[in-house]
Amino acid sequence: MLQVHSIETFGTHEGPGIRLVIFMQGCNFRCLYCHNPDTRSLKGGTKMSSEEIIELLKKQKPYFKDTGGLTVSGGESLLQRKALLDLFTKAKKLGFNTTLDTNGSILDDDTKKLLEVTDLVLLDVKHIDPVWHQTVTSASNEPTLRFAKYLKEINKSMWLRYVLVPGYTNQKEFLEKWGAHFKDYKNIDRVEILPFHTYGFYKYKELGIENPLSDCPVPTEKEIQEALTIFEKYFKSVYVR
Amino acid sequence: MNKVFQKGEWEKVIDVRDFLYHNLIPYSGGAEFLKGPSEKTKKLWDICKNLLKKEAAAGGVLDIDTKTIATAVSHKPGYIKKDLELIVGLQTNEPLKRAIKPYGGIQVVEQACEDYGKKLDPKVKKLFTTYLKSHNQAIFDAYTEEIRKYRSSGVITGLPDNYARGRIIGDYRRVTLYGIDRLIEEKKKDHAGKTGSMTDTEIREREEIGEEIHALDLIKEMAASYGFDLSKPAQNAKEAIQWTYFAYLAALKEQDGAAISLGSVSGFFDIYIEKDIAEGNLTQEQAQELIDQFIIKLRLVRQLRMKEYDQIYAGDPTWLTESLAGMFLDGRHKVTKTSYRFLQSLYNLGAAPEPNITVLWSEKLSQKFKEFCAKVSIDTSSIQYENDDLMREIANFDDYGISCCVSQQKMGSQMQYFGARSNLPKVLLLALNQGKDENAAVVLVPGISPQPERALDFNKVMAEYKKTLSYVVKVYVNAMNIIHYMHDKYYFERVQMALLDTDLDRLMAFGIAGLSVVADSLSAIKYAKVTPIRDEDGITKDFVIEGDFPKYGNDDDRVDNIAKELVDSFNEELKKHQIYRGAKPTLSVLTITSNVMYGKKTGATPDGRASGEPFAPGANPMHGRDSRGAIASLNSVAKIDYKSARDGVSNTFSIVPRALGATKEEQTDNLVALIDGYFHKKAQHLNVNVLNRETLLRAMAHPEEYPQLTIRVSGYAVNFVKLSREHQQEVLARTFFESMK
């Protein structure tokens, strides 16, 4: 069974085309800029079986065309990798595109099996500097980088994603370093810059927890352009979301 | 090089479809050939924008001719600025000046004049109170006490009994293709054929044809006053558009029915335009100029309405619906360069609610055309989409127009008797209150058993609901039969009818409002525990809901099937009755903007909706109850069986641009996939708004900065700033799909 936080039937930001997005309950990172703080706790959410989700996929099939499909996001998807293996295996068997949105923090045999039935990985590498990564996410970036390297080795298609937060993740030297680190990865189909936004702020209020970035500004057009210019030096296909 | 039209049956008999079938050349390319507005168009549109500004400043009506009863020839020729106009003709002698049309009802005309600071000429009033009879007066002579009670309670509302019914689409193209003389000749033949015993039917038909022949003469006379001879067919593109427009204008001058739609002219015009281009007589720029100028004329069409009318049909709409694209039955698509040119006018002149551009969508249309439509939707929110694959296959004809918002009508040989809608939540409340109106405690339906004390039982509620529905439908049909009998008699649409076949396929269009409210209410009764709170007279005032229940709009069959069955059962009830003039009953799930007013008149409902709160529009799920995103919501609506609602199932979809995708390209692709997917599910209609909530809020605060901000409401479009505060708030409350990420 999967522990599901919520479902978005018209996902347009979690992989190519129109996606059925399953937001999983539970996360092992504590990103300062988290816009889904309600998905953090391992408790809560709704139990759903793979079959139930497959049914939803079938209902949505006419909308997928050649590009769309299933995306599992979070929370952190890999916390439920065993259950996801079952879901992705069934989805793939029926011809649905399977996309995994993850922070890449867990790489074990179960993850590896899951990746065999995953068409595309959306990998968030939240900071290239270990110290800053720790600050931003309360976790080390070392497992994530190892995960990325593994995807390169098995030549798994991936989109690298980067949340741009003024004062936290927009330091030019680290953006350069980030680009340089991944520039030779042939399995990267695109890089996406996700400018920090405030859409999730209301959730902090609802949950009654402190929002550490409540005073943080959203990036200016100029800041976004600067990051874009840097990344474009290293990658062919960079998008701003 | 002189191109001639391909020959066909159309030469022998009146058959525009056959002409299209042999002459229309589908265009599968992209938008690259399109041109911007010409200098003349720009100057002309600037003058119009100025007039529109003046109209807004004057409170919505610029001027009224309070003396002249409108006919096709009642007013001298009018111009905006003659030397800039390629296509000529106005409803009165001045742009935006409204005419009086008292045949529908004298009181509304009098009230409308007063509402805008004018006084109806006493002579006109005397004429209609002393010597002549209006449609409205005739109806009230015939109405039963019961119908009157239903009318005032609001169980059935928006009936066209004090104003004209509209909805009839004349095949205006006939004037272009055949010229008036040929049309008169054909009608004379029909007239000569109606002989034998002079029964009611024969007499009426002979009289009507006589009126139609007279109307054809009037169109000719009107055109002659502008210096054009319509007796013969049009010879080139400019004439083709002008002839069709004159015919349409004659209808718009004589009638003021709520919706007087245009039909399907763009593909027809394209044949003439491409012929002229091929012969070197027209450039791309000139072709666009003709279309833009035609569209300008349509944007200036005005009808005189009371302010109260705005509560039902907000934003001064005219529903000049033009349906473009779609497929031929033989599998060829009907997209032409002129389909693109019509859409391009939304860039050349800016967004606007009219004409009501309706794309007849097929999965088989070219990807390039679909992407262009999506782009125009994203940029202007001015287009609606209707499922051609579904409608064409079920109807088995391919030359049709959409009347008003969602009603399919075969061009030239079908007509519709329009009749508003029944308030379905009120029907449910009647069932819960022993047939008594929840606001007035008047018994409207006899023989309804009381519900047991405490929590409502689904089966018991359904049993009484069915009895109630059956009775309400009977009264509804009675009212409609009276209305249309009288409309035919006292306000016959002679111009439109002259441009239709004499022997017609007639439809009578019924409607329902508040579908999602009733579906959710019944779901609550079935899956949660709902206990009514009753006043001292035993009338429900509110409901206590314990527990959760499935809500329509989440692709959950448990409740979606309830919604589907509500529509099916209403349609089945309609079939039990004898309809005026042998018309076939059809049903729509469409509210226009009346969902606000209907809500206001309706007490609290078992779904938790408070008394007075608006319904969702059309077949939309209730605001904020759809929690799984846009596709789940669309899929719920797609389950309503179009075969049970052949007059249309309206769905209004509003989304912020970001939620469609990050880049313009993604947004376009995703919107195309969304429409394809929705229609693949056999849904019929989709209004698409791509707007930021912030934009709407800014427009509410500074309307003067947003004169052209257009939004799609229920099957049509309006200038957002023309809506009342209440309607604006309802639009804001409506589910805007936003991205979770």
Image (spheres, coloured by chain):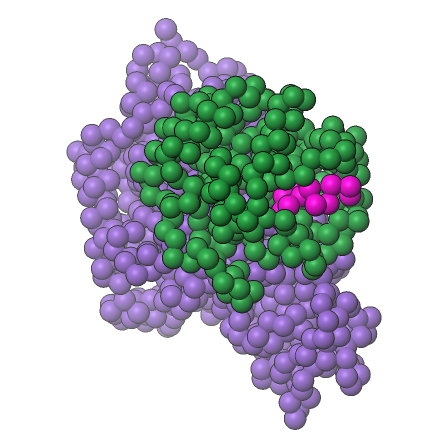
Chain colours: A green, B purple
Q: Left or right: B177 with respect to B329?
A: left
Relative placement, left or right, of A149 versus B722 is: right
Q: Is residue A25 magenta?
A: no
Instruction: Tell how many labels.
Output: 0
Q: Position of residue A237 (x, y in %)?
A: 47, 24
Q: Is residue B80 something that shows in the picture?
A: no
The residue shown at (50%, 26%) is A181
Q: Is residue A81 above or below residue B717?
A: above
B356 or B252: nearer the viewer: B356
Front one among B265 and A167:
A167
Can residue A165 be seen?
yes
Q: Is residue A81 magenta?
A: yes
Give the residue drawn at x 56%, y 65%: A207
- Give the answer, above or below, for where B314 lies relative to B31: below
Q: Residue at x 49, y 35 (%)?
A: A128
Front-most of B147 and B428?
Answer: B428
Residue B223 in the image: state x and y as whole percent: 30, 37
Q: Quadrant of the N terminus of chain B?
A: top left
Q: Residue furthest right?
A: B459
Magenta segment: A68-84
Query: Farthest top residue?
Result: B1
* Residue A48 placement, left or right of B322: right
Q: Is residue B734 above or below residue B660?
A: below
User: What is the quadrant of residue B411 in the picture?
Assistant: top right
User: In this picture, is A135 found above or below B390?
Assistant: below
In the image, farthest residue toward the front? A131
Q: State the image coordinates of residue B451 (x, y, percent, origin top left).
A: 77, 81
x and y percentages locating residue B215 in the rendered image: 41, 44
- The front one of A144 and B697 is A144
Give the residue drawn at x 70%, y 51%: A4
